[in-house]
Image: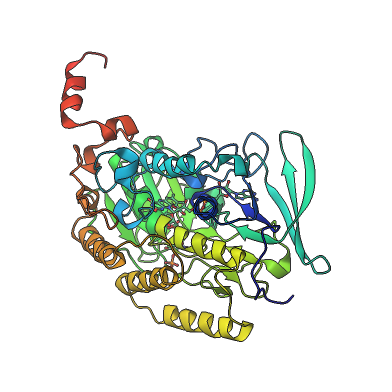
Amino acid sequence: MGTNQGGSNVADRVAIIGAGPCGLGLLRAFQQAEAAGASVPEVVCFEKQDDWGGLWNYTWRTGTDENGEPVHGSMYRYLWSNGPKECLEFADYSFDEHFGQPIPSFPPREVLYDYIIGRATAAGVRDKIRFSTPVRNVVWDESAGQFSVTVRNIDDDRTETEMFDWVVVANGHFSVPHVPTFDGIESFTGRVMHGHDFRDALEFKDKHVVIVGGSYSAEDISLQCHKYGAASVTISYRSGAMGFSWPAGMKEVPLITTISGSTVSFSDGSSVDADAIVMCTGYLHSFPFVDDSLRLKTGNRLYPPGLYKGVVWEANPKLMYLGMQDQYYTFSMFDLQAWFARDVVMGTAPLPDAAAMATEIGEWVAREEALADPYQEIDFQADYCRDLAAVVDYPPFDIDATVKMFVDWEHDKEHDILSYRNSSFASAVTGTPSPSHHTPWLAAMDDSMATYMATEVNLNERAATPNA
Ligand code: FAD
Ligand code: NA7
């Protein structure tokens, strides 16, 4: 396969796999170019669920969905943003524009879902998406110089194959759970599950819970269980403790050694009697629908090898992947990638030759492998965003300000893991400062958008109204 040096023509067809934040970002990028007068290729987005929003489209389901497909969703009730919203804000569609009023810095899931969908609706891209259409197979056809893309049309119960000039994989990588095992686990008398299937912390009220893992899911699912009344939460880490000042009822211990009945033992010689074990042990990058020769193989890292500018599949640049990085930055980084992917397709971002792409990838990977702490990781991902921002016409936003916010956020977490979500930041897009939320996160049990958006005044009115 030769590299694409000459760009595309408008007769090209582009397949996007997934209508989560990444896929929607790319749809928006093409729509923006078209609105600016460019001729754009035909774009078809395949989405296996019956609605858009990816992980932010909450589902109560676990296991398989109504069509027998693996449930994509890993999000749970009462999930609040785990980073400042100012660090993920779309530069072309601010929170101010969407909500018409300043909102606090750490919104619950429904609010961020509303925001994501708000931009996609305003862009009018829904008719580009074929819902309930999981992609089954993507193969490069050398003689045609195109991809053959096979999908299952669930509504018609038909398998269909179409040819595309470009394929952009945007199926997310926090959906297929990585589940280790531990000696004696089959004798455990309680519930064993992965964070992917965690839906409601109230299930663990008054229970003794063991959480396995040392990263974001372990941190947040532990806090959820504590907040909603677990009797105790014991977090078992492999490489290193998160080291936050956990409140009474929460503690960190090293890795599980054995499990016998209800007793879970750890490598420091301690043990607990547990009702449940929740594995927050990460996810697999999983692309069962992509031919072996096209499949990205990586763990959860900041610069997956093989992707030029973190996006373009080095071995066949007509294939691209969005959002495959470990993520400090999310929606704004996805947008920068989407704008770049669009420009590669449209030929306005010409790619260098294969050797130059390989050299640049190697430099980023080497730099990533030398990172020593989260602060260096934040700088690294900010530099990656700056690198993309320099070559696309995505509206500018203050990346330096977002770095400072991430640093403050890390300090806030180190200071008090229970209250970091009460902090307020100012928008890197509009400069608007965020108000404080009416209720501290630990006391905010209702995560609905209606309650979140309510002012103190109408909250008081509601409290004074019987049965409100
Ligand atoms: P996804 O949101 O996963 O969307 C991928 C889409 O592809 C889905 O709609 C899926 O149905 C579809 N799809 C998958 N396979 C196929 C197929 N074969 N055919 C067709 N369609 C397919 N980020 C934040 O910024 N803040 C947070 O607070 C935050 N919290 C998180 C909490 C949890 C529990 C998890 C798991 C992630 C969290 N994230 C958070 C990170 C999250 O990864 C991103 O916010 C974002 O959802 C990634 O977007 P995406 O489009 O890459 O993937
Ligand atoms: P991450 O960030 O990929 O972290 C996975 C964690 O799982 C990490 O701490 C790993 O420990 C741990 N892990 C992996 N295998 C094992 C075994 N065998 N035993 C013990 N611990 C293990 O995934 P998350 O789910 O936390 O976060 C993903 C996204 O969800 C993130 O973007 C959030 O915003 C929400 P390690 O440190 O490697 O030793």
Q: How has the structure been colored for display?
A: rainbow
Q: Residue at x 32, y 46 (%)?
A: 95
Q: Is residue 7 above or below residue 361?
A: above
Q: Nearer the viewer, residue 177 or 81?
A: 81
Query: In the image, residue 40 lies at what x, y percent?
Result: 61, 55
| Image: 83 above or below 51 | below
Quadrant where the image shows the C terminus: top left
- Give the quarter the ligand 2 occupies: bottom left
Residue 98 place in picture, x, y as percent: 35, 41
- Residue 36 in view of the camera: yes
Number of numbered discs on residues: 0
Give the answer, above or below, for where 283 lies relative to 293.
Answer: above
266, 299: nearer the viewer: 299
> Is residue 273 among what the camera can see?
no
Residue 457 position within the rendered picture, expressed as x and y whole percent measured from the top left: 15, 27
**Residue closest to the eye, 266 or 364:** 364
Quadrant for residue 111, please give it.
top left
Q: Give the residue at the far right of this rendering.
A: 143
Q: Nearer the viewer, residue 346 or 37?
A: 37
Image point 51% across, 72% down: which residue? 309
Q: Quick one: quadrant of the N terminus?
A: bottom right
Measured as percent of width and height from the top left, residue 81 is found at 34, 48
Residue plotted at (33% across, 52% down): 82
Residue 349 placement: quadrant: bottom right
Is 319 placed above or below 444 here? below
Residue at the extreme front of the image, as rendered: 37
